[in-house]
Amino acid sequence: MVFSEKTAVIEVKGLCKYFKSLKAVDELDLEIQKGEFVALLGPNGAGKTTLIEMIEGIQTPDAGEIKIFGMSWKENPIFLHEKIGIALQETRFTDKLTVMETLGLFQSFYHQSERPPDDIIDLVGLKEKKDIYTQHLSGGQKQKLALAIAIINRPEILLLDEPTTGLDPHARQEIWEILLRLKQAGATLILTTHYMEEAEQLCDRILIMNQGKIIAEGSLEDLLNQNNAVEIIEFQSAQLIQREALLKTEGAIELYLEPNQTKGRLKVKNLIRALPSFLDLAQGNMIDLISLQGRKMTLNDLFVSMTGRRLDE
């Protein structure tokens, strides 16, 4: 089956999922195009996992529909299982199987079982570990193996749930490089992550989800432009800060104080004009600044502004 570059391979319309009185997913609409890499961001409880599990066919919607390649899970589950690869945040392996044996086991679940997985081993960088028992793999190597299992059936769509959580920066970078190679090969990806830089580096489009709804979507540049990207004064004080003391800063737009009220971020229209005003107010209100940084607004700032929560909360 051949799709044009602008074909929506995943279509979600009016999707709802309830758990008693909780609306985990609330009348959600979404399209994912062929070859697109999409990041799904949201605080815990936003509905991300529920949405992904319905796309995977693990959960059944209470209302609405999901079409993948124009089909529903009810209509053609075997075909869709062949076309989708899934990698979870943590995958448990059989300790006494080698890397190659583990891949062979999972490959046997698909029609392409006669094709050797050597190219998959090479792609994920486990060639030197192929005869090692899985119990002897490092955390990064296990995540590579989980990714290899996700692509063992040569899927057209990948659904990855926090594939680099807990990895050191080097191992995380290696996973990113593998995903970018899959992108070059034409794969379509939905990625949930708690790492803002992961979404920024890998994905064409970012979806921000909160309380069962997608509240913003677009490229990083689009999101910042749509939300009047501003500049940030980030600061820390030796004592508690009263909100009123700093809101009189020239060009101040919004002030966020962390619960301890000694650290915060102030959105301003123009950093160069705002900084002298901010420092004067800090001095006049006896605020002893420990640290001060001026910078451009980031995806993390935007996320906090929209949801009132940090991504890792």
Image: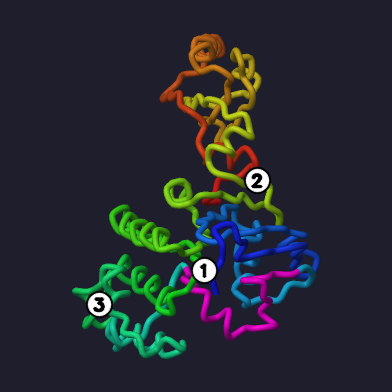
Q: Secondary structure at mark 1?
A: strand
Q: Secondary structure at mark 2?
A: strand
| Amino acid bearing label 1 | Ile
Residue 72 versus residue 280: which sits nearer the camera? Answer: 72
Q: Is residue 259 visible?
A: no
Residue 139 versus residue 246: which sits nearer the camera? Answer: 139
Q: Are marks 3 and 1 in contact (CB under 8 Å)?
A: no
Residue appearing at x 36%, y 90% in the figure: 114
Numbered disc in front, either 2 or 1: 1
Q: Identify the mark at residue 200; answer none if there is no mark.
A: none
Pointer 3 local density, CA inside 10 Å: few below 14, some 14–19, many at least 20: few
Quarter location, residue 72: bottom right
Question: What range of the chain is rendered magenta?
Answer: 65-88
**Residue 172 location in percent, x, y?**
34, 57
- The answer to which of marks 2 and 1 sits earlier in the sequence is 1
Q: Viewed as shown, does residue 146 lie left or right of 129?
A: right
Q: Mark 2 and mark 1: span between their CA atoms?
A: 23 Å
Pointer 2 local density, CA inside 10 Å: few below 14, some 14–19, many at least 20: some
Residue appearing at x 60%, y 12% in the figure: 250
Q: Mark 3 and mark 2: span between their CA atoms?
A: 42 Å
Pointer 1 local density, CA inside 10 Å: few below 14, some 14–19, many at least 20: many
